[in-house]
Amino acid sequence: MTLNDHVQLTDKANQTMYFTSVGEVSLPKDIG
């Protein structure tokens, strides 16, 4: 694995966590 591959994987993980936390935050608003 090259350093660039590692950076891309980290970016993907960060984006996934970001979208997950946004979804968790917005869910109560949608339900409420």
Image (tube, rainbow, N blue to C red):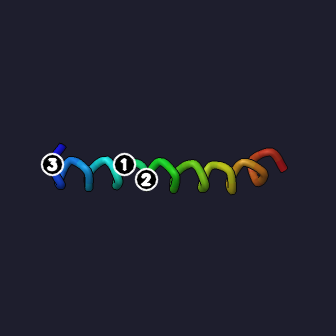
Label 1: element kind: helix
Badge 1 amino acid:
Lys
Q: CA distance from mark 2 to mark 1?
A: 5 Å
Q: Residue at x 51, y 56 (%)?
A: 18
Give the class, few, some or many, for how many residues have Cα within 10 Å of label 2's Cα (few <14, many ≥20). Answer: few
**Tag 1 residue:** 12
**Label 3 vs label 2, nearer the camera:** 3
Residue lying farthest to the right in this orientation: 32
Badge 2 amino acid:
Gln
**Tag 2 residue:** 15
Q: Residue at x 18, y 54 (%)?
A: 3
Label 3: element kind: loop
Q: CA distance from mark 3 to mark 1?
A: 16 Å
**Tag 3 residue:** 2
Q: Residue at x 78, y 51 (%)?
A: 28
x, y percent for residue 19: 52, 51
